[in-house]
Image: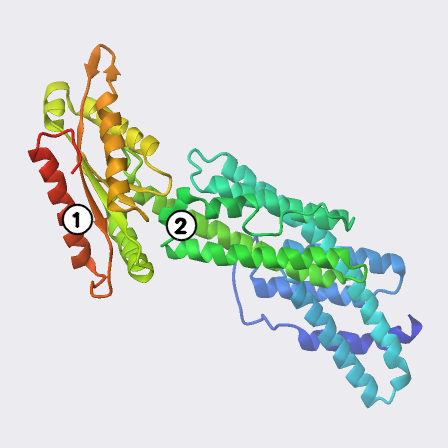
Amino acid sequence: MSIVSQYFSDIKKCVDDFSINVESIQFNTANDLLYTHVIAEQKKLLLALLLSTSEEEIDQNTKILVHYTIENDISYLFLYSELLTIARKLIGILAEKQKLEHIETINRYFSEHEDRITSLYLQKFLNQLTLKNELRLSHIAIMQDKKFMVHYESHIQWILNLILYIQQNECNENYPELDPNHCEFGRWMNSATTSYLLSTSHFKVIEKLHINLHDLAANAINYCKNKMVRPATLIHLMQRIDYYSLEIGNEIAFLNEIEESAKDPLTHLLTRRLFNKIMMNKLDISKATGREFSLMMCDLDNFKRINDTYGHAIGDIILKHFSGILEQTLRKSDYIFRFGGEEFMILLPVTDKQNAHTLAQKVCDATAAEEVVIEDISIRYTVSIGTLAILVDNTVPINQTTIDQYVTQVDERLYLAKERGRNRVE
């Protein structure tokens, strides 16, 4: 320490040269420091540490510096670059003074500071990261309608398990699932029930972020298993993981908004607004693969009579009842839209004419067999259905006009079912 103390004035000069000048920035709010003022204060704490003369003083000033750095969201990389820059400047000064015999001592002095700062930073950063994610869980827990945030909950719990594994430092095999397809969040992303979201840019962003996050986690766990691991590497990996996690949360929030606007408020089925986008995607797939898909258009028979006889409130109950029949009878991979009023459109992926007709007949039969009882009112109703199988060849343009033509064709099939007596499939 006696050798290092000879260069305290040079260390102070190096720190001053690296400081940010904030004299030109004026503000009156005492409680909210500008980031440049935070950095200026952090420089003072760093200088106090570098000029410490006893182990007790070094230990105390290291804790103060690291706590301040984390509390004010100053990245470890910034702190590390400060140490590195100051050390290089000081070594340059030693070289100019021809004090080459002291370079090794100065290098060791800064390396020891780096090791202490890094170890403590990792410990406190992981503690803070745990608190942040627990707070995120508590915010989600009080949401009245979580929608897709319920899946983000499972993702946050995965993050907490990863943090705990790193903190325990046991280097065992009891780490979180590393395959992005097999974790709970990944299984949700791959599930058929969310297939209508696959065409959204937000879903694609989440998919990429999630894969990158698992890749980072795999690296973090590999570093934990390596006894020569540098805490700086884990800090960098966990900071990136936290960043990706927050971005996933933001994109999930956007999906929630899409879900809100894409779902019919009465039946909770998809709305017509989403139909064209999904239809365009299925036309592209059919054209590329040469496989057909089908449309099914349903219209409740004599629905106006139900509204006129019992009122629109009862009519709404019937619409919700039929929506339930569709969801129970059709497959999870099918897209069900409330197309308008008492009309419903179903898009059946990879389904030929015969299978589409079979599914439609199941819906028709299930509807006719049901009875809706509301207090002392008993109502039976039926549905007419038109079906259309679609196979797109290379001559068919993929545009809105083509979509409209297919909708017109399936509507004509529905009209034929009505014309031939209702309660039937055409």
Q: Earlier in the sequence, mark 1 or mark 2?
A: 2
Three-letter amino acid code at the position of disc 2: Phe
Position of the C terminus by quadrant: top left
Label annotation for residue 391: none
Q: Residue at 16% x, 58% y: name it.
A: 401
Asked where in the image residue 288 lies, by quadrant, the reply is: bottom left
Q: CA distance from mark 1 to mark 2?
A: 30 Å
Which of the two discs, 1 and 2, sits closer to the camera? 1
Who is closer to the viewer here, 185 or 355? 355
Give the vertical position of 52 relative to 359 (above or below): below
Three-letter amino acid code at the position of disc 1: Val
Give the vertical position of 337 relative to 129 (above or below): above
Give the vertical position of 242 relative to 143 (above or below): below
Q: Residue at 91% x, 70% y: name it.
A: 1
The reply to whether dot 1 and dot 2 touch (C-beta < 8 Å) is no
Asked where in the image residue 108 lies, by quadrant, the reply is: bottom right
**Residue at image mark 2:** 254
